[in-house]
Image (cartoon, grey):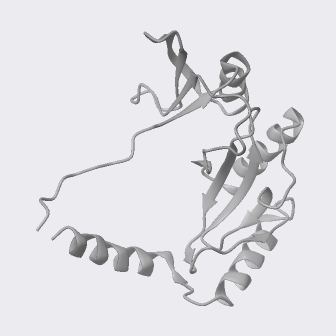
């Protein structure tokens, strides 16, 4: 038996090539606040960013990303927002920045359990801003969705598609099942 230990996700750090424009993007566009910035012993520059005044940092940017990597080692960064209107606001803000929002894994999509806007930040890190839905469906699942439609239409489209998929259930039911699974795995 493994002794139970309480763990909660805290923050993520990513290597960047040019920290100045990245700090500007994450503060000006994404709404983070710079909480600290400095130089590490190895000469790398580091910046700590937060949107929560009780958390020193939620995102860390550090110089040292090698040039010429064949792919981005960050699969994605994801940020939850509070409403469909806030998601639309972020989509408009991102489009005004002319970040990459088109491509096979980018744009406005639904996973059934979320409605998301995917884009690539200034250095190409795939990033998601999303809202939760009140439903669960088996993952992975993704279909494009037009979030410029009226709220009622967006929610109706997402629900109709989610209900047509295997494993559809209210998120509260899925949460209860996961509570039991997590407790059992820690027993």
Residue nearest the observer in this picture, 120 or 85: 120
Residue 71 vertical position relative to residue 3 in the rendered view, above or below: above
In the picture, the quarter occupied by the N terminus is: bottom left
**Residue plotted at (54% across, 19% down):** 47
* Numbered marks: total: 0
| For residue 123, side relative to residue 23 (left or right) | right
Picture coordinates of residue 108, whole percent (x, y): 79, 59
Residue 135 vertical position relative to residue 88 in the rendered view, above or below: below
| For residue 65, side relative to residue 91 (left or right) | left
**Residue plotted at (77% across, 44% down):** 89
Picture coordinates of residue 168, whole percent (x, y): 57, 86
Residue 93 vertical position relative to residue 183 in the rendered view, above or below: above
Q: Quadrant of residue 22?
A: top right
Residue nearest the observer in this picture, 75 or 71: 71
| For residue 68, side relative to residue 5 (left or right) | right
Residue nearest the observer in this picture, 53 or 141: 141
Picture coordinates of residue 94, whole percent (x, y): 81, 39
Picture coordinates of residue 72, whole percent (x, y): 67, 43
**Residue plotted at (79% across, 46% down):** 91
**Residue plotted at (56% across, 80% down):** 138
Residue nearest the observer in this picture, 167 or 60: 60
Q: Quadrant of residue 136?
A: bottom right
Residue 17 vertical position relative to residue 94 in the rendered view, above or below: above
In the picture, the quarter occupied by the C terminus is: bottom left
């Amino acid at each position: 038996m493994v002794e139970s230990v309480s763990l909660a996700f805290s923050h993520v750090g990513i290597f960047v090539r040019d920290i100045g424009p990245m700090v500007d993007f994450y503060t000006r566009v994404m709404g983070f606040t710079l909480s600290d910035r400095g130089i590490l012993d190895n000469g790398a520059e580091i910046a700590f960013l937060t949107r929560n005044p009780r958390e020193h940092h939620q995102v860390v940017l550090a110089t040292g990303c090698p040039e010429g990597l064949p792919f981005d080692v960050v699969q994605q960064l994801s940020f939850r927002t509070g409403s469909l209107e806030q998601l639309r606001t972020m989509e408009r803000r991102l489009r005004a920045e002319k970040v990459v929002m088109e491509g096979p894994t980018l744009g406005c999509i639904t996973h059934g359990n979320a409605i998301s806007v995917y884009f690539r930040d200034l250095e190409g890190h795939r990033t998601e801003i999303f809202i939760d839905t009140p439903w669960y469906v088996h993952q992975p699942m993704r279909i494009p969705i037009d979030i410029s439609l009226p709220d009622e239409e967006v929610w109706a489209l997402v629900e109709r598609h989610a209900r047509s998929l295997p494993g559809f259930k209210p998120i509260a039911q899925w949460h209860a099942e996961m509570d039991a699974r997590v407790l059992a795995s820690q027993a």
